[in-house]
Amino acid sequence: MKKLILSVLFINAIVFAQSVNYNFEQYTSNYTNLNNPISINNNLIWDDETYNINIGFDVKLFDITTQNMIIAGKVNLNVMNLSMVNSIVASNADLVDRGLHTDELVSLSPISYQIDELNGSKVLKVEWKNAGFYIDDENRNYVNYQIWVYENSNRIEIHYGPSNTDNFNYGWVNDFCAVSEMVSQQEAHSFMVQEINNEYNFSYRNVDEIFTVSTFTKIPEEGTVFCFYPTNQVSLKENDKLGAIYPNPVTQFLNIENQEREKIDYQIRSLDGRIVQEGTSSLGKIQLNLAGLKQGIYILNYQTNKIEVKKYIAKL
């Protein structure tokens, strides 16, 4: 019997052992600096430093539950259990404090965090502000990131802020983002966002010694949000005005709830970029007939004048 796991791009319905599976959404949201942050680097120049954050509430990443998050080198958050480390990787680039490239012994790239309340649950927000690149001796390029981790739902959001990477080849930095579970000292499972054919694509990857990745050629635009959420949770946008998208997997009709009857532009593409269906509707329930599509994974993009969402759909 075949089994199709929605949160990964498996055309042939492969089954694998995994403690938690993650879904993915990409959308846009205004990027705002933290308004009441607590310093992590304490105005000291950083380069591959390790920091611990005691957040005061439980978060779960794969099968590890903790109240302690660890920053280790790159733009990431890690949780540990004995010798195993599970990770949220917002950027694989070798980022440093921009103060490292100056004669002043003062940090120019603060790392900070704050904890907010949202609908009765806490949200950890960690910010890397005005971070530079180790390979950028002229100190002309910078990036801004935030990682948000939600209590109870264990959602993970990677927010991209203003950046300037015009003065060197961004492809050199081997960048991608992922949530990863360490299964041995030599192997990990990753739900990963890569760049393929100028599009950001979500997939499940087994990371071992011969692992290769299609890295970003450019940093995502300001306001881009990559959201990973466990498969037993509904997405943030499905709780928003647009309502649910169902069923997923789908055999024939895919429904988009549009409670506010907003104008929605939608497009369904195959993984190789072909547009297989598109249109515009303001109906309260938009019904798309996918009966003519072959079995596999497709990308649904839909937008209103307020938001833009990217979601993966499994066609049976």
Image (spheres, rainbow, N blue to C red):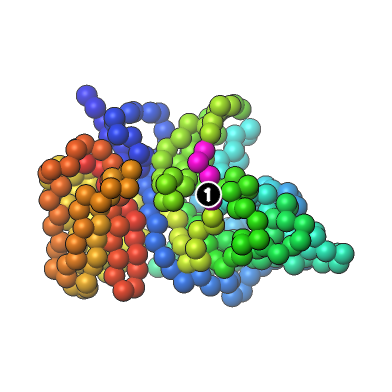
Residue at the spot 25% in from the left edge and 42% down from the top edge = 314
Q: Is residue 64 left or right of residue 43?
A: left
Residue 250 in percent (x, y) is at 18, 44
Quadrant holding the N terminus: top left
Q: Is residue 48 above or below residue 296?
A: below
Q: Nearer the viewer, residue 281 or 90?
A: 281
Residue 310 in percent (x, y) is at 34, 56
Q: Nearer the viewer, residue 131 or 199?
A: 199
* Magenta span contains residue 40: no
- Disc 1 crowd rating (10 Å Cα; few below 14, some 14-19, many 20+) is many
Residue at the spot 35% in from the left edge and 68% down from the top edge = 307
Secondary structure mostly seen in magenta is loop
Q: Nearer the viewer, residue 131 or 22?
A: 131
Quadrant holding the C terminus: top left
Give SS at disc 1.
loop
Residue at the spot 25% in from the left edge and 51% down from the top edge = 275
Q: Is residue 137 above or below residue 260?
A: above
Q: Quadrant of residue 280?
A: bottom left
Question: Label 1: which residue?
Answer: 216
Q: Nearer the viewer, residue 26 or 81?
A: 26
Q: Quadrant of residue 128?
A: bottom right
Q: Is residue 57 left or right of residue 21?
A: right
Q: Is residue 214 left or right of residue 271?
A: right
Residue at the spot 44% in from the left edge and 45% down from the top edge = 196
Residue interval drawn in magenta: 213-217
Amino acid type of the residue tagged 1 in the rendering = Phe
Residue 165 visible in rendering = yes
